[in-house]
Image (spheres, grey):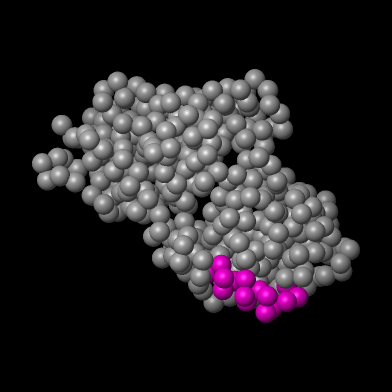
Amino acid sequence: MSGSTRARRVLIIVENLPCPFDRRVWQEARTLAAAGYTVSIICPKGKGYERSREDIDGIAIYRHSLPFEASGAIGYALEYSWALLAEFWLSLRVLMTRGFDVIHACNPPDTIFIIGRFYKLFGKKFLFDHHDINPELYEAKFGRRDFFYKVMLAFERWTFAAANVSIATNESYRNIAITRGGMPPDRVFVVRSGPDLRRLRRLPPKPELRKGCTYLVGYVGVMGRQEGIDLLLASVEHIVKVLGRRDIHFGLVGGGTELAAMRALAEQLGVAGFVTFTGRVPDQELLEMLNTADVCVNPDVANEMNDKSTMNKIMEYMSLGKPIVQFDLTEGRVSAQEASLYAQRNDPVDMAGKIVALLNDPQLRERMGQFGMNRVAQELSWDHEVPRLLRAYDRLFEGSRVGG
């Protein structure tokens, strides 16, 4: 940055999760701050993140309340409308205090472009951080391509049209930005959600998490409809009742709208004694579960959304040296390669067989775990993404002066 130009100022807006709980957004914010940017964040409140205003590591966080958690199309529309109003109000507060030169918008939803368009009238820049493909996410949640699906496509198109620069989490998303979104290829940068190896520490296993069993299978992630927890529970049922294996416990870490339903389903299937649902827990408890696990799983449903999306949990498993079983999805293979076995899409019986086969083969588990750990360290950790994020920002500010 030129010494004659005031430090670039960034306002990150994220609606989906609070910060610093949203690990990708927090890594981006810390990276920008370390590079000399003045960084502010607007996000929702959440469990453990109830303060309206907080400063962490020199980053100013402004949080707004969400009056309810949506569960249907109309509910999501109301939630996102409320969030958009709260984000706009807080953006005015940031503008009048810390200021900003660019809005860094993280989806879902694809509505933050409305705020970006407004501020572009006053010379601000707009960067779109493409976390989820929203039309496919809508289809995954509701199983239909109706009027609201077309609205999602329109919002996505308008978001890309507003963006000066877009960053994508993988090549599949970059292709969507260029083809469906009409973005010039030289303004779309791939910045993967690499794990922070300083956070994902290897710890001694805690045998009590196995609940008296020989083996532990671990999962971390959201308990939602498209995450396939129902398919995983069907795999557990097959392992226990058909394969007769009662020496395997499953530790499922994470919260979400389907958590209560999944607990009820485990009871209904008669496998509740073999499954621990922790809900959302602090990082320490998450790390204890994953470090104790012999195998980790990703039961994400095979659909257009999940096939094109990079799942953070995969690389977190790999960073801890854990072999993986997942359904055979395009970006899942790109991330894990030889660190995973791949079950037939949406087939809980095949997933069950691969989990048991992997538990029966400690040498294979060791080889797969070592491969994944090396791949993260050498190619996929966040440290490898830092230069890509900074290049995207250099492109954003190319030929312009800021802070005037």
Q: Position of residue 403 (x, y in %)?
A: 18, 35
Q: Is residue 361 magenta?
A: yes
**At 62% across and 35% down in the image, what residue appears?**
136
Along the viewing direction, whichever of 294 and 341 lies nearer the viewer? 341
Q: Is residue 46 visible?
A: no
Q: Is residue 356 visible?
A: yes
Per the rendered image, the range of residues in magenta is: 359-373
Q: Is residue 170 magenta?
A: no
Q: Please identify the quarter of the rendering in which residue 186 is found.
A: top left
Relative to 126, residue 321 above or below: below
Q: Position of residue 399 (x, y in %)?
A: 22, 35
**At 36% across and 54% down in the image, what residue appears?**
386
Relative to 337, residue 246 above or below: below
**At 57% across and 51% down in the image, what residue appears?**
311
Q: Horizontally, is 301 left or right of 63 in the view? A: right
Q: Position of residue 308 (x, y in %)?
A: 60, 44
Secondary structure character of the magenta stretch overall: helix
Q: Position of residue 135 (x, y in %)?
A: 60, 31
